[in-house]
Amino acid sequence: MKVMNIRCKIFLLLSLILFNGCELFEPHEYAGKIRGEKSINTTNLYQIENNCRNKEVIKFAVISDSQGWYNQLEDCVNDINSRGDIDFVLHLGDLTDYGATHEFAMQRDILQKLRYPYLCVIGNHDCLGNGEYVFKEIFGELNFSFMAGDTRFVMLNTNSLEFDYSERVPDFIYIEELLSVKNPSHKRTIVAMHAAPNSEQLVKNLSKSFHSYISRFPNLLFCLNGHGHSFLESDIFNDGIVYYQCTCLKKRGYYIFTLNADGYEKEIIMY
């Protein structure tokens, strides 16, 4: 009799799990149940292009690696908002530690407080778990570009290691497609990414090809990257093209770049 009672209880429990499982248990943090604003990069890049059309002087902020440092990100947003001269903000990836949906959502909700449009590239930590899917839903494609005045910004996924070198990362086909587009207003280029060439994410055999490809863009002014958690200026290939690495937000710093007819100016901001 006791055995029958135990079997009945097990049967009832399994039935509850089968028919009501979604209500009994919370979804795993990588489940990708996404609420709130989505396709942010797509929306904001159009705003940036419209706002910067025909502008001769463009000023933008660069932040990176805000993973887990929510208070520092809040302070950074407040510091950028206190300025009245910014056209847009670039985030160079690693919004998250583990690629979890709630991490992306929390970071997004803080960044949404910016007075200026912002864009994000994907970092290696953002690729973990279900992160690639969540990033695409909230922000958009992993490779994209936009025009700000006469300057094309090329935003690229360089996290080759996270894709086991089995996918097109970097996506040379995408870069070739951009190079084939002839736009008379495209006078200068800036390339932004998370991991720089010769990092553990973008190993040497890929790095030379990557740099060779992007060097073909018209008047490549400089490149931007995060990942290293410190400010660093490096002419990696000794050809005059500088990679500016942005520090992490734990260290409470970011860049301001100003583009003008004579070239550009750079400033490090500590807050």
Image: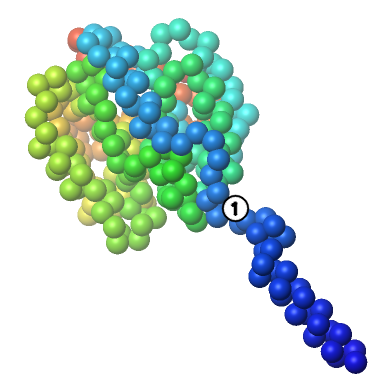
The residue closer to the viewer here, 147 or 261, is 147
The residue closer to the viewer here, 226 or 4, is 4
Which residue is at a point 47% across and 50% down the rendered structure image?
131
Q: Where is residue 219 in the image (x, y as percent from the top left)?
A: 14, 25
Look at label 1 and name its amino acid: Glu
Which residue is at a point 76% across and 73% down the rendered structure image?
13
Q: Position of residue 257 (x, y in %)?
A: 34, 18
Residue 264 visible (yes or no): no
Residue marked by disc 1: 29
Report whether 18 appears left or right of 146. right
Which residue in the rendered view is the most extreme toward the right?
A: 1
Report whether 29 appears left or right of 151. right
Report whether 214 appears left or right of 26. left
Answer few, some or many: residues within 10 Å of disc 1's Cα (few below 14, many 20 plus, some between 14 and 19).
some
| Residue 232, placed above or below residue 184 | below
Report whether 258 appears left or right of 20. left
Quadrant assignment for the C terminus: top right
Q: Position of residue 119 (x, y in %)?
A: 39, 30
Q: Where is residue 54 in the image (x, y as percent from the top left)?
A: 22, 11
Quarter of image, res 135: top left
Quadrant assignment for the N terminus: bottom right
Residue 44 visible (yes or no): yes
Quarter of image, res 41: top left
| Residue 181, placed above or below residue 54 | below
Which residue is at a point 56% across and 28% down the rendered structure image?
110
Which residue is at a point 38% across and 39% down the rendered structure image?
140
